[in-house]
Image (cartoon, grey):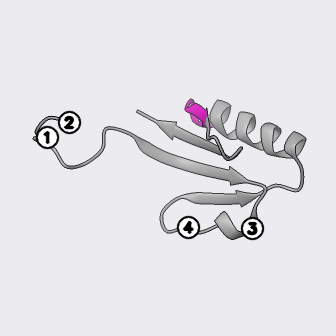
């Protein structure tokens, strides 16, 4: 990694959608607990579309909605 001139990341995490209640830890990010995978995917798509944001699925199965 090179030297960074701006310590602030160039993205903003808007939402974190999970099926695991132990991962619903939030400060400035909307953290949602879904009841099943279908609901999790639907919530993620709806939030991303309404906020014109991107989505990443983490290896653990959770989703992050973010904007660059």
Distance of mark 2 from mark 3, alpha carbons?
34 Å
Q: What element carries label 1?
A: loop
Q: Which of marks 1 and 4 is nearer the N terminus?
A: 1
Identify the image quadrant of the N terminus: top left
How many labels sit on residues?
Answer: 4
**Between residues 53 and 57, which one lies in front from this camera angle?**
57
Report which quarter residue 58 is drawn in: top right
Q: Name the residue rendered at 62%, 51% in the picture.
A: 16
> Residue 39 appears at what percent x and percent y?
87, 45
Distance of mark 4 from mark 2, alpha carbons?
28 Å
Residue carrying label 3:
21
Q: What element carries label 2?
A: loop
Instruction: Specify the segment rendered in magenta.
Output: 51-56
**Between residues 57 and 51, which one lies in front from this camera angle?**
57
Q: Which of marks 4 and 2 is nearer the N terminus?
A: 2
| Residue 4's disc number | 1
**Between residues 27 and 47, which one lies in front from this camera angle?**
27
- With respect to residue 49, does 64 lie above or below? below
Q: Which of marks 2 and 3 is nearer the N terminus?
A: 2
Distance of mark 3 from mark 4, alpha carbons?
12 Å
Q: Is mark 4 on a helix, strand or loop?
A: loop
Residue 24 appears left or right of 46: left
Q: Name the residue rendered at 24%, 48% in the picture.
A: 8
Tag 2 near tag 3, CB within 8 Å: no
Tag 3 near tag 1, CB within 8 Å: no
Q: Is mark 3 on a helix, strand or loop?
A: helix
Residue carrying label 2:
1
- With respect to residue 3, does 23 lie above or below? below
- Residues packed near mark 4 inside 10 Å, few (<14), some (14 to 19) or many (20 plus): few
Identify the image quadrant of the C terminus: top left
């Amino acid at each position: 990694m090179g030297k960074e001139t701006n310590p602030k990341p160039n993205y903003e995490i808007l939402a974190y959608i999970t099926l695991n209640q132990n991962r619903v830890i939030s400060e400035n990010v909307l953290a949602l607990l879904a009841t099943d995978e279908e609901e999790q995917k639907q919530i993620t798509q709806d939030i991303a579309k309404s906020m014109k944001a991107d989505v990443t699925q983490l290896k653990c199965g959770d989703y992050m909605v973010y904007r660059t």
